Image (tube, rainbow, N blue to C red):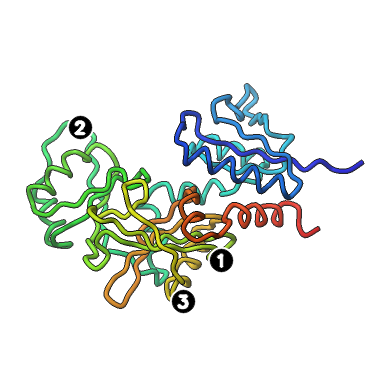
Amino acid sequence: MQYMKKGLILVNAYTRQERSLNQSKRLKEELEKNGVDIDIKRNDFFIAQIDNDGEIISKAKDYDFCVYLDKDKYISLMLEKSGMRLFNSHNAIQACDDKMQTAILLAQHDIPMPRTLPGLLCYENQKLIVDAIQRVAEALGFPVIVKSSYGSLGKEVYKANDMAELCQIAEKLKFSPHLFQEFIQESYGKDIRVIVIGGKVAAAMLRQSKGDFRSNIELGGEGKNIILPKEAQALCEKSAHLLGLDYCGIDVLLGENKYYICEVNSNAFFGGIEEVTGINVAEKYAGYICQKVYGKD
């Protein structure tokens, strides 16, 4: 009797974005070409829970693996504790979900990054510590980038041009984790988006905006196919390895004769880069997953 290969793609319970849904559909198509029966499910049915005996009960035992397209850290951890192989792993997703944590984990490994300061987290309704914000300005200069530690698609990423704007943004974010980052002038409105699968660069494109300091396609940026320079390729592959990622999208800033790792996204959309480069990213990812789970036929 032939063994039935079966996998699960788990998406966020509330997601309705077409780009996110396309991600799961494309992966399903390519995985099924590899002979794997795939279910796509929303993460809304408590697939893992803890019973009265302190045991983790999983409803995913019939699946060989799970492509985890969510950031719910509790479900991912419980699934792994119950023996499920996740793409990406729980630890890798958590390392990328928090931008400050990503920077800390990449630090001291010869990975160039913009100078970065963690935001001061306010737990009570207190006035902004302006002296601390002044120290940020002195350390990083203007303009300065301020980001929420969580978020994607360029959301909650701000550019402060002076002290007044910096205080206004810091006031807005003081109750949630955030960070301050050096502005790389040469990369204004442009960066390189790189997809890394299994530790190797699979695709890269230059993203450029006509009117925004952020280059995200979702914010109006345009993509262009490029040959990724070897220096940038090495940085991306090393970063993915350090963070333990099976799959990721890495944003690379262009400095003066230098590249900087800006952000790493464990669930980066690949629809745009497939269109721009003509590279079937979903096929490459599906092939990698099948090789890891089932080995070579």
Specify few, some or many for label 3: CA neighbours under 10 Å numbering under 14, 14-19, or 20 or more. Answer: few
* Residue of label 3: 230
Q: Name the residue at 24% across, 61% down.
A: 188
Contact between labelled residues 2 and 1, with CB atoms less than 8 Å apart: no
The vertical placement of 241 against 180, above or below, is below
Q: Gap between marks 3 and 2, in whole Å?
A: 48 Å
Percent x, y for residue 2? 88, 43
Q: Gap between marks 1 and 2, in whole Å?
A: 45 Å
Q: Which mark is residue 124?
A: 2
* Residue of label 1: 200
Q: Amino acid at mark 2?
A: Glu
- Judging from the image, what secondary structure is the residue with disc 3 in? helix
Q: The C terminus appears in which quarter of the rendering?
A: bottom right
Judging depth in this view, the residue of 39 and 174 nearest the camera is 39
Q: Gap between marks 3 and 1, in whole Å?
A: 12 Å
Contact between labelled residues 2 and 3, with CB atoms less than 8 Å apart: no
Upstream in the sequence, badge 3 or badge 1?
A: 1
